[in-house]
Image (cartoon, rainbow, N blue to C red):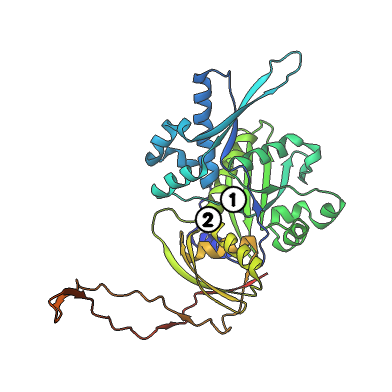
Amino acid sequence: MKQISIKSLILLVSLMGLAGLARAAEISNLYDYEVPVASQSPDDRNAAIGQAMRQVLIKVTGNSSVVGQPALKSLLRNASQYVLKFTYRLQEAGSDAEEKRFIRVYFDAASINQKLRSSGLPVWGKSRPQLIAWVGIQDRSGRQLYIPDADPGLSNMLFSLADSYGIPFLLPLMDLQDQSSISSSDLWGNFIGPLQQASSRYLSDMIVVIRLQKNADGYVKSSWSLLDDNESLDWQVNSPSQDDALAQGMQKLAGLVAGAYAPAGGSSLEQVVIQVNGVTGFDAMVKLQNYLAQLESVETLLVRSIQENKVVFSLNLRGGMQSFKQAVALSNFIQPAPEAMDPVMMQDVYTPPEMPEPEPTISGDGEISAQMPMPEQPAPVRLDRIDLYYELK
């Protein structure tokens, strides 16, 4: 597999941080997973719960290697302790096959997140970039664009793999508009302009190109590209089977996207002060607070000042400022504002100093009382530090 350079990784991170271009998608099933199960016996159920937990950890982190982390051995060993509920489903089969049984397991999100963070591992929130994938196939008849309706098995495989990593994934319709906008030469030539123009109708955040080359023996050579404005990240996977080539390629793709978007693991926090303008009314304020609080990178928030339509928050962030900016860019709920705006002037919170124990005094009539010396009140300190400026959309 081709190695991706440090320069390319930096390029990808800068791409993820661009604001105003992101649409994002909300993943609703991060903490539940359905797996086949032989029966409803306790042994089969517990084995299936362990398998479901492994898949949930991969989805929440976007990294398939997370299940091998020593810090998570106890979590996997005691997966049943994190279960909120489970349901069974029967899939009817034809006359020549047995019916299949599945179990869907729902896990406690807060407990899993706490375990991951305490182990120094990232937690990738439910707001994730939307990917559009253009697929090309090369065989003895030549190069051609993949049309999902012509081979639904391939599209089902791609969607299943993307879902296992919690990646919002789209395939183009490949209708007349798509076929007139893009060609196989654009895919194999990695011509970014036509690919971006053709992808614009799908409101995607990122463009993926997958090229599959099959030989007579079924051996598959696959090349993958993750595109930005001017360049691309490229890697190759060669395998005896198409399914394995796709699985390995999707694993690399998920790792790259999660590595750029998921807040860094660990317990360290960075304090950032942001100002949001255009907050008119109580309802807008409540929505803004709720929005910031649900961001995966935000550990705590404090309202520092409200003046007219400007609100200043102090945020404690996981993963640093870059992770926060990427999450905001995805949701597009607030937009970056010019830093030339007049900052809100804030009065710092006054914390009284520790005082000594009061000294007893004797009055003229012999009574003993304690008098507390009055501390000097420091002059208010006015702060004007604003790290980031935003406007409520």
> In the drawing, does residue 69 fall left or right of residue 373?
right
| Local SS, label 2 | loop
Residue projecting furthest to the right: 176
The residue indicated by pointer 2 is: 296
> Which quadrant would residue 378 be assigned to in this image?
bottom left
Q: Position of residue 209 (x, y in %)?
A: 67, 51
Above or below: residue 68 compared with residue 8: above
346, 238: nearer the viewer: 346
> In the drawing, does residue 260 fall left or right of residue 174?
left
> Which quadrant would residue 352 be assigned to in this image?
bottom left
278, 46: nearer the viewer: 278
| Local SS, label 1 | loop
The residue indicated by pointer 1 is: 126
Amino acid type of disc 1? Answer: Lys
Residue projecting furthest to the front: 365
Above or below: residue 323 compared with residue 148: below
The residue drawn where x is 64% and y is 35% is: 242
Q: Are marks 2 and 1 in contact (CB under 8 Å)?
A: yes
Amino acid type of disc 2? Answer: Glu
Above or below: residue 383 compared with residue 226: below
334, 212: nearer the viewer: 334
